[in-house]
Amino acid sequence: MNASTRRSRSLPEDGIVFPANRPLHRRGVSLVELLVCLAIIGLMISMLMPAIHAVRMSSQRTVCVNHKSQINLALRMYADANKALPPPPRPGYPSGWTWEILPFMEEGAMQSSLVSGQPITAAGNASAARSRPPLYRCAFASSWRSSDVAGILPADFLAVVSESKPGSRKRTDISLSIVHSPETNTLPWPVAAEISWEEYGRLRSQDAWKVWHPASSGTGLSGLIDGDGAD
């Protein structure tokens, strides 16, 4: 058998001939290519984050509006059932509009667990007062925050509705027409200019109601509060 015959027999069936004595090399990814890929991924993430944040904020805003609408509906139902707005709070006792409307927002059991004739600090009320109605939690707050008042009282707030006009201590009437006004479909009560927690302390109103707002989250409060509960 000659050399040409041996070479022909060594050829594979597909006709591909690999050069003899030449090692196969696999090309890897260089450091530069890896850095470029990481940079592209980082750029894509940075472009997506604002969109994700916008969607999240829109969702939270929708939840917030829904909560306020349900609270307003509960207030309307209370007004229709009692032909009057909730009475002013009694400092130190389960009272005020946030407590009065609980049965109208499917939280009757929570109200029943509080004894109105006993102080919030009483043994039978202390633990129940830390209950947290979901509708009273600001949708923008990451968690319930601690404060110097009971659990169903803490709040971030945007507006105060009281016997006093915004920026004035002059008394004015609060009528049932407020809760039946068409404007209350999206916002429960008339909105005053945003005020701080410290400014509220100087209002001295017995009928102050607050509406939450994320911008005041620096006060360390969350949810909805009956104004005098903070005294």
Image (tube, rainbow, N blue to C red):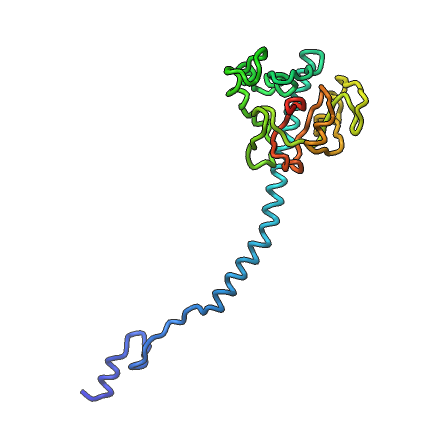
Residue pictured at 71% horizontal, 20% vertical: 207
Q: Is residue 31 above or below residue 123?
A: below
Q: Is residue 148 left or right of residue 158?
A: left
Q: Position of residue 27 (x, y in %)?
A: 40, 71
Classify the position of the C terminus by image quarter. Answer: top right
Q: Is residue 10 left or right of residue 228?
A: left
Residue pictured at 68% horizontal, 11% vertical: 82
Q: Position of residue 114 (x, y in %)?
A: 55, 15
The front one of 102 and 169 is 169
Residue pictured at 76% horizontal, 21% vertical: 163
Q: Is residue 157 left or right of residue 42?
A: right
Residue 208: quadrant of the picture = top right
Classify the position of the N terminus by image quarter. Answer: bottom left
In the rendered image, the residue lying farthest to the left is 1
In the rendered image, the residue lying farthest to the bottom is 2
Q: Is residue 105 above or below residue 58?
A: above
